[in-house]
Image: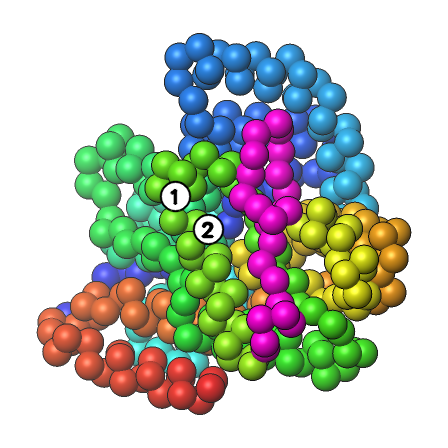
């Protein structure tokens, strides 16, 4: 009996096609028009769309395009890394699961290659099993949920759609924590000792968390597990939140305000890592590595190091392979005995990582 055509879709947020005001404007319009990203109905929705179209999309694209241009290398870093992750996962799956014909593809929630277009493409090509792996370790209604929305809309307009599964999150997955820990250890082995490890996560408005978004809980859980694996004491690490936008209160403490105050408390040397980002992008390479470094150094800091995202490092690839195995159980056999084989293999990988 032949296996159904199976695909894995690695999905990240998105990127403009070029570092130009016009391309950035198209991208921001799609991104910031999503009700999941900026909530509100009725009058509030109308107010937001007016502000977006008349103010933000008029003035912000030129500034953001300059920032993208400063980190652009033939393509956006996010898309370059996503392609690297696709290639690395494809190779790893071919080596570890040679009997299973699984093809790996990229997709973006906003911009290109778009998730909806990719689902159409795969369906037309005869893929009957599709595993969607959002590259967001911590679930949020502002990032992961839009992927569910796009899939739902695709299914509503398609009579015979494939079996689609979505990985909800992996914020406390042992291989994810181990990969983060190894990246910190490897970085610190080659760099001067620091006073504190700052774990900076992308923020969301506080009211979203108050309404039940589990994102801050996931972030703090990731930090706690990473600090424990690294053997850090409570004064050697801190969780913060970056990239706030607009006048509303966002998750606190804010990364830039924290970095501004640390030197006066005696913390002169910091390492900073962004565990919510699976790939380096504008928010890590420009905001964290450049802007926030300037904030810290101008406040009296002496040493500031950004630890890169996992990108396509071996630890990240091992995690993705494990997630594919775990979430595709039952697709390749009549009965997988409660996934004992898959669970045993995954536990061996976890033990090896530890």
Q: Main secondary structure of the magenta part?
A: loop
The furthest residue to the front: 265
Q: Nearer the viewer, residue 259 or 340?
A: 259
> Do tag 2 and tag 1 residues touch (Cβ < 8 Å)?
yes
Residue drawn at x 27%, y 66% is 328
In this rendering, does residue 84 appear at all? no
Residue drawn at x 48%, y 12% is 46
**Disc 2, SS:** helix
The x and y percentages for residue 265 are 77, 61
Q: Quarter of the image for the N terminus: give it.
A: bottom left
Give left or right: position of 294 versus 4: right
For the rendered model, the colour scheme is rainbow
**Disc 1, SS:** loop
Residue drawn at x 29%, y 37% is 152
In this rendering, does residue 319 appear at all? yes
Give left or right: position of 28 versus 211: right
Compared to residue 21, the image places residue 115 above or below, namely below
Query: What range of the chain is rendered magenta?
Result: 232-254
Give left or right: position of 205 versus 94: right
The x and y percentages for residue 142 are 45, 40
* Label placed on residue 216: 2
Q: Is residue 245 a member of the stretch shown in magenta? A: yes
Compared to residue 161, the image places residue 233 above or below, namely below
* Label placed on residue 213: 1
């Amino acid at each position: 009996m032949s296996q159904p055509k199976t695909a894995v879709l690695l999905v990240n947020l998105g990127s403009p096609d070029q570092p130009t005001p016009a391309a950035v404007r198209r991208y921001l319009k799609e991104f910031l028009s999503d009700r999941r990203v900026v909530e509100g109905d009725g009058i509030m929705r109308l107010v937001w769309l007016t502000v977006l179209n008349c103010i933000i999309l008029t003035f912000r694209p030129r500034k953001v395009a300059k920032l993208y241009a400063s980190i652009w290398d033939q393509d956006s870093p996010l898309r370059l890394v996503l392609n690297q992750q696709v290639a690395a996962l494809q190779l790893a799956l071919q080596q570890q699961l040679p009997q299973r014909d699984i093809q790996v593809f990229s997709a973006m929630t906003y911009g290109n290659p778009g998730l909806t277009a990719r689902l159409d493409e795969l369906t037309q090509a005869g893929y009957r099993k599709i595993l969607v792996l959002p590259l967001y370790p911590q679930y949020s209604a502002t990032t992961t949920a839009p992927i569910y929305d796009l899939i739902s809309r695709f299914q509503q307009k398609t009579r015979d759609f494939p079996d689609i599964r979505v990985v909800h999150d992996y914020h406390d997955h042992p291989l994810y924590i181990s990969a983060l820990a190894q990246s910190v250890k490897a970085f610190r082995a080659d760099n001067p000792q620091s006073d504190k490890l700052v774990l900076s996560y992308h923020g969301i408005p506080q009211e979203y968390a108050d309404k039940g978004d589990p994102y801050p809980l996931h972030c703090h859980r990731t930090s706690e597990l990473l600090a424990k694996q690294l053997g850090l004491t409570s004064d050697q690490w801190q969780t913060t939140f970056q990239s706030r936008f607009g006048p509303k209160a966002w998750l606190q403490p804010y990364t830039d305000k924290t970095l501004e105050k640390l030197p006066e408390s005696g913390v002169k040397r910091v390492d900073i890592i962004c565990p919510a980002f699976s790939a380096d992008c504008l928010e890590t390479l420009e905001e964290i590595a450049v802007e926030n470094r300037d904030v810290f150094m101008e406040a009296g800091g002496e040493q500031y190091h950004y630890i890169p995202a996992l990108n396509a490092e071996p630890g990240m690839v091992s995690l993705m392979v494990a997630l594919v195995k775990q979430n595709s159980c039952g697709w390749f056999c009549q009965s997988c005995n409660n996934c004992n084989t898959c669970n045993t293999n995954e536990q061996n990988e976890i033990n090896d990582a530890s």
